[in-house]
Image: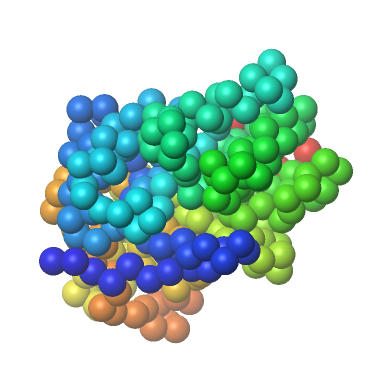
Amino acid sequence: MRYCICFEKLLHGDKLPVLGFGVWDSPKDLTTKSCLEAFKVGYRHIDTAQGYSNEKEVGQALKQSGLDRKDVWITSKIWEAGADVDATYEKCLGSVKDIAGDDGYLDLMLIHNAAVGAEPRKKMWLAMERLHAEGKFKNIGVSNYGIGHIEDMKKYAKVWPPAVNQLELHPWLQQREVVEYCKKNDIVVEAYCPLVRNQKKDDATLNEVAKKHGKTTAQVLVRYCIEKGWSPLPKSDNPGRIAQNADVFGFELGKGDLEKLDALPQETPLVLAVDNESVP
């Protein structure tokens, strides 16, 4: 069964599929297979990274899928800068080649983590701007950035605001201040680890909401992100769960459900995105 994957507009007019498929921690021998399963049930948005060591496998899935390139949204991320902007440019270009080939492009490239420091962040952004101007990156953005990090970009960025800020987001980690800032500045918010690494599957409130709607706890968590206006990136290598996690467009959480989930105690992100120099 294929599900309706809705779209979120980006600043440059491109349409980001609101539901993405994450491949963090997906073994190389499973990544291609899992991506193909995701395509089969309707996902059209794959989120990978240089640090995941599976960009080539995502590229293989893209080739084997038979889908038109224009119909699939591919995101990757750069973790660390090279020695200078030129070297960083080459590192970024490597992602394009590994995923989409020499003549290909990526729909979105992100700086993976603000914790690398101010100067590496600047080098990465300047390199990404060059690839954006050349059409190799259709959109460029950031991940794990606090408000201060995004404001600091104004000193050197020709492309501002970033198209996306990808953050760890779920009911126990709502990062309200930076999310509100992104909303005010037309920055699309993506939610990684929306399933909380399966650590909250026994939570009483979550299970109460899931039972009410006849859905799994994972489906409720994905739906929660969508109703909060975030683009969730659930990850699984289990075909059944891949399909289940996409089956979230046939129900809505009520106001009371959202209020209960919003009221859950907040935790500290594993990756801190603070406004000075963040640390992993």
Residue situated furthest bottom in the rendering: 255
142 to the left or right of 69:
right
Q: In this view, does 101 lie to the left or right of 209?
A: right
Compare residues 138 and 199 and report the one nearer the observer.
138
Q: Looking at the rendering, in which quadrant would you find the C terminus?
A: top right
Its colouring scheme is rainbow
Above or below 30: residue 46: below
Foreground pick, 51 / 138: 138
- 136 in relation to 86, above or below: below
Instruction: Name the residue: 39% across, 38% down.
Output: 100
Total marks placed: 0
Q: Residue 223 at x, y = what percent?
A: 36, 68
Indicate the quadrant containing the N terminus: top left, top right, bottom left or bottom right: bottom left
Residue 8 visible: yes
Picture coordinates of residue 4 (x, y %)? 28, 72
- Which corner quadrant of the image does residue 255 belong to? bottom left
Q: Residue visible at 35% across and 58% down?
A: 71
Residue 34 appearing in the image: no
Residue at 73 percent across and 50 percent down: it is 159
Q: Residue at x 36, y 78 (%)?
A: 253
Q: Position of residue 20 (x, y in %)?
A: 37, 55
Q: In this view, does 59 lie above or below 247?
A: above
Rendering coords of residue 82 (x, y %): 64, 19
Q: Quadrant of residue 152?
A: top right
